[in-house]
Image (cartoon, rainbow, N blue to C red):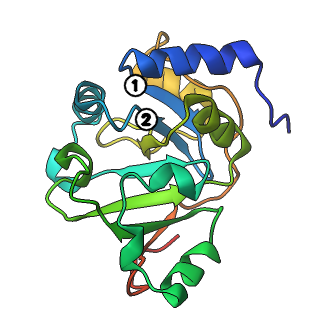
Amino acid sequence: MNNNLPANEISQLVELLKQQQVIAYPTEAVFGVGCDPDSEIAVNRLLALKQRPVEKGLILIAASFEQLKPYIDDASLNAAQREAVFKHWPGPVTFVFPAKPSTPRWLTGRFDSLAVRVTDHPLVIQLCEAYGKPLVSTSANLTGLPPCRTAQEVLEQFGEAFPVMKGPTGGRQNPSEIRDALTGKLFRQG
């Protein structure tokens, strides 16, 4: 598996993110659609595309924990809670952290928390590192359709012109597990 994209493809995707566009990319199990988490315009485009209500909140996917710190209240975790989280990262487990008061409602929805993941997918790591921050990440599928597992499926559902990072998913069968960072409670089985 080629885990490196040509630099020009990464730079084209980063340029689209800077233009507040939504892109698709492979994750651990399925393709995701994502955008700049700091752009309300981009997030609203993603929500409209997915027909997803803002109240549900979103997930951020990152190359490193450092990229997530501007959005989450890391200080609310004790050493044992932090150790439990880091035991799963990088990897396909999403954790719900208390959000910083400054984290926009277009990310948290009706919650005072935010779901975040440090990925181990090499292409997403490259993309987030090139962009310099995390991406909003939700499954690439239109309402009522199964999540896309290939770049071709993304183009079939979203149209031939939709910007897609070509490459394989991580091969996992199930979407990421979701757990509470404070309690360890399982919200979604992985």
Name the kind of residue labelled 1 in the image: Val
Against 185, residue 165 (above or below) is: above
How many marks are shown on the rendered structure? 2
Snapshot quadrant of residue 101:
bottom left
Residue 132: image x %, image y %? Answer: 55, 35
Q: Which mark is residue 34?
A: 2
Residue 74's x, y, as percent?
A: 42, 69
For the N terminus, give its image quadrant: top right
Left or right of residue 130, residue 146 in this image: left
> Few, some or many C-alpha atoms within 10 Å of disc 2 (few <14, some 14-19, many ≥20)?
many
Secondary structure, mark 1, is loop
Task: Determine whether 123 is above or below 170 in the image.
Answer: above
Look at the picture and state if 181 lies above or below 30: below
Seen from the viewer's position, the closer of residues 111 and 64 is 64
Label 2 SS: strand
Residue at image coords 63%, 66%: 89
Q: Quadrant of residue 100?
A: bottom left
Where residue 179 sits in the image (x, y, percent)?
43, 75
The answer to which quarter of the image holds residue 180 is bottom left
